[in-house]
Amino acid sequence: MTMASGHRLGVSTPRVRPRTSRMGAVQAARAATTGAALVVLSAACFGLQPVMARIAYAAGMGVPAVLTYRFAIAVPLFWLALAALRQPLRMARRDAALLLLLGAVGYAAFSTMYFEAVDLIPAAAAAGLLYAYPTLVAVTQAGLGRERVTARLWLALGGATVGTLLVLGASAQGLRPLGTLLALGAAVGYTIYLIVGHAVLARVPPLPATAVMTSGAAFTLIGVAVLQGQAAPPASATGWAAVAGLAVVTTVVAVLALFAGMARIGPTRASILNTVEPLVTAATAALVLGERLQVPQYLGILLIVAAAGAATRATAGSDKSPG
């Protein structure tokens, strides 16, 4: 504004322009660095999710109870964050209903399948198989005519397929068929959830949308746990610490850091940086849980992660779906 005004008034500004440009460049670089750090923090928090779930299971909790207390703690925190940040809850009734339905059906189903998979197969394998979803989303969007079909997209699909086969085929040790199917089902379920929810998520700001969706998921998950008689609270300090970590670290902090990072660097770069998530899971599962996969399985996880990044780059800027 100052430089433009100077030009209109005929004022010489050669000395001001470079300084202002440098300051703007420095601020942009700082914002990008901060945004990238926040997204990586978010991915690391998400990556801890299966490890904390396994700790809760070891403390005697079942999947329904873990999900019940995760959402019972996280949902009020999302609403508190919404109030603290003074973000208005403005959305059409139809959008609110769709978000509640997405949470109650889509997000609840995806979460249940993923947490059941983590209970049955190694955490790193479950996280690696789940992370096929970015490639599945890109390919599905292309099939629906919403993305351009490119060579990079086909390469991503091939890489994800080979990576999945490596994870599944390197060794049957620790990979129970039901757990494997649940992990792949979670990837498919999350893909459907994202594609179906694309339109409404484009109309509603992310934090209000998250508060409403997680409320819907909590309603379903807590209701199912109560009906099954599996909503008993943790019986030990370890169990409470695990579900508190799941709620606060891997849900609330992870989501808020992701939103703050995306605001600074955009969704495409954020999606690419998010591919460190399964790598964090593999590292922490090895360190904390003592889980070990065979070398081909770790290579398969790396291939899936690389495919996710390639799929994101392949579809960047080509979304033709209505906003």
Image (spheres, helix red, strand yellow):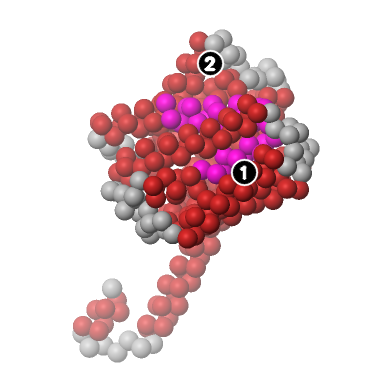
Along the line of sight, the residue nearer the viewer: 109 or 57: 109
Q: Would residue 33 be found to the left or right of residue 53 on screen?
A: left
| Tag 2: amino acid | Ala
- Residue 60, picture quadrant: top right
Mark 1 residue element: helix
Q: Would residue 192 be found to the left or right of residue 250 on screen?
A: left
At 76% from the left and 48% from the top, the residue drawn is 295
- Residue 17, picture quadrant: bottom left
Residue lying farthest to the left in this orientation: 9
Task: State the mark number for residue 164.
Answer: 1
Which numbered mark, 2 or 1, is in the foreground of this view? 1
The relative height of residue 205 versus residue 233 in the rendered view (above or below) is below
| Tag 1: amino acid | Thr
Q: CA distance from mark 2 to mark 1?
A: 32 Å
Q: Answer whether residue 181 is visible to the viewer in this image.
A: yes
Instruction: Say which residue label 2 marks.
Output: 225
Magenta residues (range) = 105-133
**Crowding at mark 2 (Cα within 10 Å: few <14, some 14-19, many 20+):** some
At 39% from the left and 87% from the top, the residue drawn is 15
Residue 289 coordinates in the image, percent (x, y): 75, 36
At 50% from the left and 31% from the top, the residue drawn is 110
Circle nearer the N terminus (2, 1): 1
The relative height of residue 171 versus residue 65 in the rendered view (above or below) is below
Magenta span main SS: helix
Along the line of sight, the residue nearer the viewer: 204 or 304: 304
Whether the magenta-drawn stretch holds residue 34 is answered as no
